[in-house]
Amino acid sequence: MGIVRRFVRRAVQACFLTLPVVLLTAAQPLAGAADWPLFLGNSNRNSIAESAFDPPLEVAWVYDAPGGVDSSAIIVDGTVYFGEMDGRFHAVDLETGEARWVYQANLGVPASGCVTQGTVFFGDEEGYFHAVDIETGKQKWVYQTFAEILSSPHCSEDTVLVSSYDTHLYALHPQTGELKWKYQTDDRVNASPAVVGGKTFLTGCDGMFRIIDIRTGEEDSFVDMQDYVAASPAVVGSSAYVGTFGYEVLKIDWEGGRVDWRYSHPVTDFEFFASPVVRDGLVVIGGRDKRVHAIDDQTGKLKWDFETRSRVDSSPLLAGDVIWVGSMDGNLYALDHNRGSLLWKFAIGGRIVASPAVGGGRLVIGSRSGEVYCFARAAQ
């Protein structure tokens, strides 16, 4: 079971621009802040918090998960849920950092869960999909796919969607785990399905962007992206945005069935594993070229980029005018959304693949070094 450490582990390693490291005073949660119930916060996978969350921050607690954490946290009703790469899945009190329960899956849990109707759902690397009671931590049901599950599910009251490396997207009944339908793609699926207006949007290793009717499981249409894709799409209106392993970010007109533009960095050629966040004419995404890229939504041209010291597989989160994103260099960064300038950073130390989650007035992110950090606004 994880061990919580509050304020005593080490001095807060934070810096605001070029100011020296300081110890902060008592952390202040934001009253009435919204939950973060699934990967990237919402059904269209566009990672935008409902309210501003500005630096500087202070560590509220640190929770030990020695198996390492790749999964992004979800936050619902004062509880943080995340998976560990040794197969344990944790429910942790958001306020105190104390474990409420720990559930043992078959193998590692690399992706986020989702919560609906008193149940948290998540997959593991052995291909099992778990439904666990959020009050007791006891298994309700489990469904077996035929390869590892690296995808974060989507939950609604009547359907849970999850994709598997066995090439299928599954629709399951949330109460019973009964299969409603499954859709087969032409290759493995790493991405998490986005959902808008009764349709689910799926990308995969076959290079296709697919639009599937959630009620029937039938494909409505597809767009050939011409490249291997591991990232989850963000869907905003009639457009979808996704990065590829062909060194590009695409804007897709999914209603028109075409690619509007293809972005590639003017200097570097590296893959995009993270998902983008889209608002105010900017598409912001992390790349394996160690950069955070901001792309003009109209032209597909670079507006700004910010260079870290290692690849950025963490998907950025936008809260107010601040981009929050982790890097494999071990830092959590806060960047100005409009200019890309550094506002603040915190050295977690371990490589960060997980994306930040904001809920209940806290920001939560884990690392491969086996620690989950919870931050709150510093007292003014």
Image: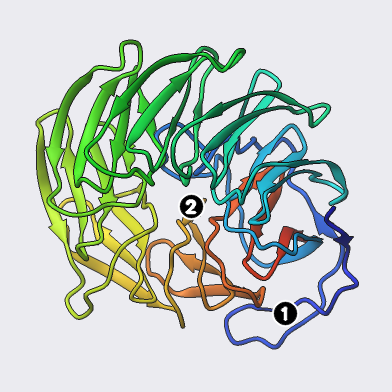
- Along the line of sight, the residue nearer the viewer: 187 or 375: 187
How crowded is the residue under tag 2: few (<14 C-alpha within 10 Å), some, or many (20+)? many
User: Label 1: how many residues lie within 10 Å, few (<14), some (14-19) or many (20+)?
Assistant: some
Given the current orientation, which residue lies at the most extreme front position? 146
Residue drawn at point x = 33 percent, y = 73 percent: 305
Q: How far apart are the alpha carbons under marks 2 and 1?
A: 22 Å
Secondary structure of residue under mark 2: strand
- Residue to which mark 2 is pinned: 318
Kind of residue at badge 2:
Leu
The answer to whether any part of residue 80 appears in the image is yes
Let me know if residue 379 appears in the view: no
> Label 1 amino acid?
Gln
- Colouring convention used in this rendered image of the protein: rainbow
Residue 65: image quadrant is bottom right
Circles 2, 1 touching at the beta carbon (< 8 Å):
no
Question: What is the secondary structure assignment of the residue under circle 1?
Answer: loop
Apparent side of residue 128 relative to residue 97 in the rendered image (left or right): left
In percent of width and height, residue 79 lies at 76, 39
Horizontal side of residue 164 vs 173, given as left or right: left
Left or right: 36 with respect to 304? right
Which quadrant of the figure has residue 350? bottom right
Q: Which image quadrant for residue 140?
A: top right
Q: Residue at x 72, y 79 (%)?
A: 13
Residue at label 1? 13
Q: How many labels does the image show?
A: 2
Vertical placement of residue 359 versus 155, above or below: below
Q: Position of residue 178 (x, y in %)?
A: 52, 13
| Image quadrant containing the C terminus | bottom right
Give the residue at x 53% y 55%.
355
The mark closer to the camera, 2 or 1, is 1
